[in-house]
Image (spheres, coloured by chain):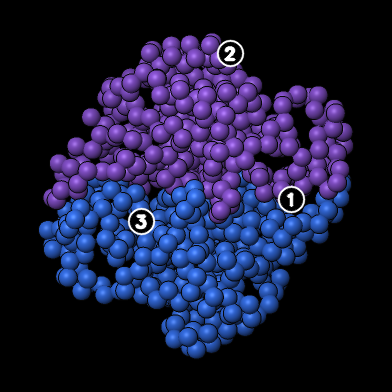
Chain colours: A blue, B purple
Amino acid sequence: MRGIKKTILNHLHTPKTFWELMRNQDVNAVQLINILNNLYEQGIIEMKTQKIYLTQRGEKQDSKVRLNRHTRCDFCDSGYLIDGFGDIYYRFKSYYDTKPKNIPGFDQGSMRCKDVLKRLVFIYDKGDLCNTRILILGDDDLLSIAIAMTGLPQEIVVLDIDERLVHYIHDVSSKEHLNIETEVYSIENKVPLQKKMDVFISDPVESLVGIKLFLSRGISLLANGGRFYFGLTHIDSSLSKWQKIEQMLVNGSCVITDVVRDFAFYPGVYYKNIKERLFFDPGLPPKSWYTSSLIRGVKLEDKISESGSVSLGTSLYKDDETITVK
Amino acid sequence: MRGIKKTILNHLHTPKTFWELMRNQDVNAVQLINILNNLYEQGIIEMKTQKIYLTQRGEKQDSKVRLNRHTRCDFCDSGYLIDGFGDIYYRFKSYYDTKPKNIPGFDQGSMRCKDVLKRLVFIYDKGDLCNTRILILGDDDLLSIAIAMTGLPQEIVVLDIDERLVHYIHDVSSKEHLNIETEVYSIENKVPLQKKMDVFISDPVESLVGIKLFLSRGISLLANGGRFYFGLTHIDSSLSKWQKIEQMLVNGSCVITDVVRDFAFYPGVYYKNIKERLFFDPGLPPKSWYTSSLIRGVKLEDKISESGSVSLGTSLYKDDETITVK
């Protein structure tokens, strides 16, 4: 419940009508009414000109700057636009452009700079950025830096296996006063974190054993009501693998709230394996052939958790469906 | 596999590069390569100017008119637009505007006319309209008519409890030479259909027992590899109910491939229950407060099925989370 109430308060950093608020979060009408009635009785929200406002008392509990960034496509009202975050995009891009080069051995492959921002916009739009504790497991996209630049999260922790990247994020964080906590960490080890987080974000490896490990480690660190975001492709994962991942989530006390197709593009992905196996020449791929879907879910209660150590070798990165890993 | 191959052939009604094709369907790269190699060996596809074409032999197997309708938002490339189906929209709208009025007793509530078209565009975009056998369980939105007007499906069957609606769809179908099969049918009875379908579409009731029944009946009629589409709201269904629905799907040999938030809007939904329970006056709702997410999935193999009769009474329409049903 804590997670839900927090999300609703996050949305109220900009006053909204009851009906707008209903649309912009996950809980059902009965739950939303109960939460709002409760906040109203406690004097945390009030109604003015048909909109719900945080009262002075509500503001005091949580003194974040009010932000009203533009997120939805004006044309179709369903896509996401990064235009409202233009200031952050340009500030972020210079760091993105000079980050350490990807190492295939770590299965690193970064999404386009603008897709990092799009992921940020999506998470912001769900009310999951503002005043939350965020864990990012693997961050070769540098999402942590873009998110921290919004000034919205309460805390950001990045764990990554790549020392170069961890140092880079740490240096940018110091220089830009972003307060991102970083630590070198291999997914095979126990997570060096005691506290519960509100949001968990990852672009996991796509072997079944690997992705299960990433998700279970991250989700085990979420408080109940916490949200998680991860990318998953159709290219390296069959629908049966998708099903197994979904089974793990929904049988493990999570619910899937969004699956957005082709959300991010990854330039420069290795495609020699594909070319070699085809009976005809597919020609050169365009820059944007390798796409990933964005999956969002909520942890309802604690059942999924991998807290001990494991040893996986290359099966962490590859199974017989992963075709774009060298 | 039949379903997957069919979808890929559907996409090839318009020649595509290998890389475009990879993006526009569900199977992973290894499966896609195998299917294409097979079609190539059989002389069903060929490569010309870096695109994959159906050969004359391929065209003969399936002589549908080639259609290349515009579907994606030009501005953000992720939303769906109905503009490419303008001819069908205007032809459809006159029937939509004069359809029998909704009866709350049947839990009828129709999405906006343009959202019916948007659902059609989404299904078309996935390659699931062309040359498929489609089952629609409950059709107070008249989606069957719009879909039939594209001339793409092989067959459309509509089952609905409302005799007025069934007659109306039947009459429009005759008048417009659409060949929609219709039958009056209550979800509590055995489905009067022997054959397997490729696509199942529904906007089910949202009581847990009711939605499970709708989905299990529809999915039991799908061939392996068949696709299903249904609407689900956050308003009348909590995240725990979502989780139970997802558990039923993914534990019952289905996989969820898309969950698109706020896909359709339902004007004129009953909101007195909401107003009465709130401690403050929320004001009048705008037309578009009641939204529904669109969920798409694929049946991998047969495990979910409800084929016998059941008797549910009002629990079919309502449970303690449904707040917008009178």
Task: Verify CB contact (< 8 Å) between mark 2 and mark 3.
Answer: no
C-alpha distance separating marks 2 and 3: 53 Å
| Helix, strand or loop under label 2 | loop
Q: Is residue A44 left or right of residue A299?
A: left
Task: Verify CB contact (< 8 Å) between mark 3 and mark 1.
Answer: no
Residue drawn where x is 58% and y is 75% of the image: A93
Dot 2 or dot 1: first in sequence order is 1
C-alpha distance separating marks 3 and 1: 40 Å
Q: Quick one: A39 or B89, which is closer to the camera?
A: B89
Q: Amino acid at mark 3?
A: Glu
Q: Chain of mark 1?
A: B
| Helix, strand or loop under label 1 | helix
Q: Chain of mark 3?
A: A
User: What residue is pinned by disc 2?
Assistant: B177
Q: Residue B19 got which mark?
A: 1
C-alpha distance separating marks 2 and 1: 38 Å
Q: Are both tags, 2 and 1, on one chain?
A: yes
Whole-percent x and y of residue A257?
43, 50
Residue drawn where x is 56% and y is 33% of the image: B86
Q: Residue A301 got which mark?
A: 3
Whole-percent x and y of residue B1?
69, 34
Q: Amino acid at mark 1?
A: Trp
Tell which tag, 2 or 3, sits nearer the viewer.
Answer: 2
Q: How many marks?
A: 3
- The quarter of the picture where the C terminus of chain B appears is top left
Q: Is residue A41 left or right of residue A75?
A: left
Q: Quadrant of residue B271?
A: top left
Task: Verify CB contact (< 8 Å) between mark 2 and mark 1.
Answer: no
Q: Residues within 10 Å of mark 2 (few under 14, many from 20)?
A: few
Whole-percent x and y of residue B31?
73, 44
Q: Amino acid at mark 2?
A: His
Residue drawn where x is 44% and y is 82% of the image: A178
